[in-house]
Image (tube, helix red, strand yellow):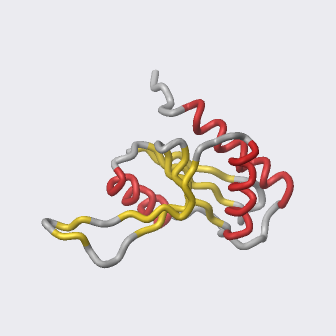
Amino acid sequence: MNELILKEESYRIIGCCMEVYNNLGKGFLEIVYKDAIEYEFIKSNIPYKREKEFEIKYKNIILKHKFYADFIVFDKIILEVKSKKIIIDEYVKQTLNYLTVTQLKLGLIVNYGENSFKSKRIVL
């Protein structure tokens, strides 16, 4: 039987994200949800970094463009926040790329644009 990695940490993160959904519902811009999630992380004493910048290495150089993860939580989990109709493959691939660059093992995508709160676990 497969054990979920970072089960307790991801449970706490999703709990905060669901609290945001229960209070705001759907339809806001992503930035609104990010602000509310940040508030919930602070209130819940969850360590995080917001809009964390990462360099992308290619062969022996660092590329000019960087990427910014919405949140790095517990220094172990990437959290990507969306407010779209559905979670599409592009968001999954983006999160997989972020996991590869950061060498982290777990990404969570949360979506506030559907008729109900949706989340997806991405494991590298």
Q: Is residue 52 left or right of residue 8?
A: left
Rendered image quadrant of residue 65? bottom left
Q: How many marks?
A: 0
| Placement of 92 over or under 6, stated as above or below | below
Name the residue furthest bottom.
64
> Which residue is outermost to the top?
1
The residue under the point 51% across, 33% down is: 6
Left or right, 101 with reference to 32:
left
Q: Residue at x 39, y 52 (%)?
A: 99
Residue at image position (48%, 25%) is 3
In-front residue for pair 41/31 = 41
Query: Which residue is at the front of the view, 122 or 104?
Result: 104
The percent coordinates of residue 108 (x first, y second) are: 55, 50
Q: Nearer the viewer, residue 101 or 96?
A: 101
Quarter holding the C terminus is top left
Residue 90, x across and y down, in percent: 46, 67
Q: Residue furthest right?
A: 23
Q: Residue at x 45, y 58 (%)?
A: 95
Percent from the top left, x then y, of residue 18?
A: 75, 48
User: Between residues 73 and 116, which one lies in front from this camera angle?
Assistant: 73
109 relative to 53 in the view: left or right: right
* Residue 38 percent coordinates (x, y): 69, 55
